[in-house]
Image (cartoon, rainbow, N blue to C red):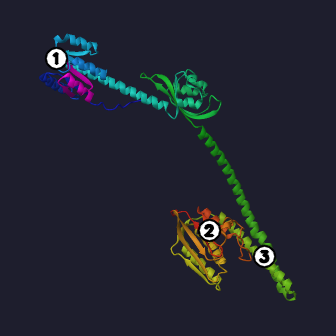
């Protein structure tokens, strides 16, 4: 793994010398020889100690004999503050006692006066090399600590073995997953914990990575699944020294996948059942349409023949019975037609397109007005109302809603029926409102169920299929339908349609 160390910051050198000429000369020489150094200077030990405390330089060069505080005392205090700072002492031959003192406090580099620039440069170079080596070692240690923390805190379980598979390291995630403690695992062969066959180990021994899934067993005997990646580790000579395995617990993922597979199988079986049911329903519809309606047609026809041939000789009660039979066959035929239409509409394919609901409502309103010219009906239809859906099915929705509004306003001297659109949160709600009989909201849950009626046939005729048809069509479009009403104050039926872009 290649590591990219941070840029090395500039090093700072502190030079302490009481002779001004020497101090300026040496600073100039050092600056030319080591342009990468930041050089600071002081005229005595006290000032030098103060600068050290303020600046924290990386290395120090100091004279020994100086006023205020000598170099040895300053160096002693500096080393007390930071024991690793390199210090170079410059001294004359007569300062041998001071040199011995400097050696005793741990200073190993010195340059005799008069200062030989070559020796001074060599001493500084040695200090710089030591400092850089120390910084590099520190950076390496920080990097190793970072890697160690990453492995220890990894969300994946990690195990390192030697080339024979003997475990040398496991991270906390591995022990938590398997249930074994670290002492129970170290020194144990990984083959004992995972039965993967020798093919895996042969792949690793050949220098290749291995990836795959394993079904393993915890210490408790509980089975679990992992997705594993195992890699060989090479030394500088290219020899394999270890294997490292990184494993991710996929037990829940596998369990979910199995549940999804079972669900898909169940859905597939259910789809087949529905397909069979649809075929049976189509067969039933055909039977109802032909085999059941044919006898009704015959009964209706014979009743008409009886009335035509023998009506004059029948008494009034007998003719009434025949007329009742005729009326019931017509009602039965209408009910069969309604059921067939309901079945067909709820199974037909939806063909989306742009539908002009205002135009549809206007056409339907005109038809209702023509069929009942004796009634006083006023339709208020909002212009420009459009929607995205199946135009034919949406026409059925409006036909049922407007037809119901017309029917349930039949006892009003003047019927008012409205169609429009209003905002409903983040979506648009289309509505049909009337001032008719209304209904009790406590019974609203029965409103859209097939064959459920809130009024008697004596009040208003019908089969109870219209609103069920409306709900089924709107639900197939992905919308919803609901109603608000008050007895004798009318009702409002709302429906929504998803906002879709026309394909």
Q: Position of residue 264 (x, y in %)?
A: 64, 48
Residue located beneath label 3 in the image: 329
| First along the sequence among labels 1 and 3 | 1
Q: Magenta stretch?
A: 39-64
Q: Residue 483, which numbered label?
A: 2
Quadrant of the rendered image containing residue 338: bottom right
| First along the sequence among labels 2 and 3 | 3
Q: Position of residue 414 (x, y in %)?
A: 62, 83
Q: How packed is label 1: few (under 14 Cα within 10 Å), some, or many (20 or more)? A: few
Classify 145 as above or below 497.
above
Classify 77 as above or below 248.
above
Residue located beneath label 1 in the image: 116
User: Spatial distance from mark 2 to mark 3, Cα to Cα?
Assistant: 33 Å
Q: Residue 25, which numbered label?
A: none
Label 3 near label 1: C-beta < 8 Å? no
| First along the sequence among labels 2 and 1 | 1
């Amino acid at each position: 793994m290649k590591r990219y160390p941070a840029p090395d910051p500039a090093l700072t050198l502190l030079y302490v010398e009481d002779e001004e000429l020497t101090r300026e000369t040496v600073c100039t020489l050092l600056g030319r020889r080591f342009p990468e150094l930041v050089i600071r200077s002081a005229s005595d030990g006290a000032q030098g100690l103060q600068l050290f405390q303020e600046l924290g330089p990386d290395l120090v060069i100091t004279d020994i004999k100086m006023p205020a505080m000598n170099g040895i005392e300053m160096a002693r205090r500096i080393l007390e503050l930071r024991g690793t700072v390199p210090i170079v002492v410059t001294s004359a031959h007569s300062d041998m006692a001071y040199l011995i003192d400097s050696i005793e406090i741990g200073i190993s580099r010195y340059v005799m006066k008069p200062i030989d620039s070559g020796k001074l440069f060599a001493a500084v170079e040695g200090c710089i090399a030591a400092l850089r080596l120390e910084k590099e070692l520190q950076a390496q240690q920080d990097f190793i600590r970072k890697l160690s923390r990453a492995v220890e805190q990894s969300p994946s379980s990690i195990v390192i073995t030697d080339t024979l598979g003997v475990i040398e390291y496991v991270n906390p995630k591995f022990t938590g997953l398997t249930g074994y403690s670290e002492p129970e695992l170290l020194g144990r062969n990984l083959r004992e914990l995972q039965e993967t066959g020798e093919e895996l180990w042969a792949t690793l021994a050949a220098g290749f990575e291995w990836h795959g899934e394993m079904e393993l067993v915890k210490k408790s005997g509980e089975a679990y699944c992992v997705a594993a990646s195992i890699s060989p580790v090479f030394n500088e000579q290219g020899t394999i020294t270890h294997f490292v395995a990184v494993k991710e617990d996929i037990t829940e993922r596998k369990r979910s996948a199995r549940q999804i597979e079972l669900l898909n199988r169940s859905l597939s079986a259910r789809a087949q059942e529905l397909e069979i049911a649809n075929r049976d329903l189509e067969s039933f519809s055909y039977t109802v349409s032909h085999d059941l309606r044919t006898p009704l047609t015959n009964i209706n026809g014979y009743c008409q023949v009886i009335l035509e041939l023998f009506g004059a000789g029948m008494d009034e009660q007998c003719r009434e019975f025949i007329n009742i039979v005729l009326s019931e066959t017509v009602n039965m035929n209408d009910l069969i037609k309604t059921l067939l239409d309901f079945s067909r509409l709820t199974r037909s394919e939806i063909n989306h397109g742009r539908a002009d609901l205002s135009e549809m409502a206007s056409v339907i309103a005109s038809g209702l007005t023509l069929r009942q010219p004796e009634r006083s009906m006023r339709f208020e239809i909002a212009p420009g109302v459009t929607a995205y859906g199946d135009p034919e099915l949406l026409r059925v929705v409006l036909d049922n809603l407007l037809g119901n509004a017309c029917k349930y306003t039949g006892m009003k001297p003047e019927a008012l029926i409205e169609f429009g659109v209003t905002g409903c949160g983040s979506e648009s709600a289309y509505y049909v409102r009337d001032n008719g009989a209304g209904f009790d909201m406590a019974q609203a849950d029965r409103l859209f169920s097939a064959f459920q009626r809130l009024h008697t046939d004596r009040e208003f005729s019908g089969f109870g299929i219209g609103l069920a048809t409306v709900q089924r069509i709107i639900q197939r479009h992905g919308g919803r339908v609901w109603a608000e009403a008050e007895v004798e104050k009318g009702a409002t039926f709302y429906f929504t349609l998803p906002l879709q872009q026309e394909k």
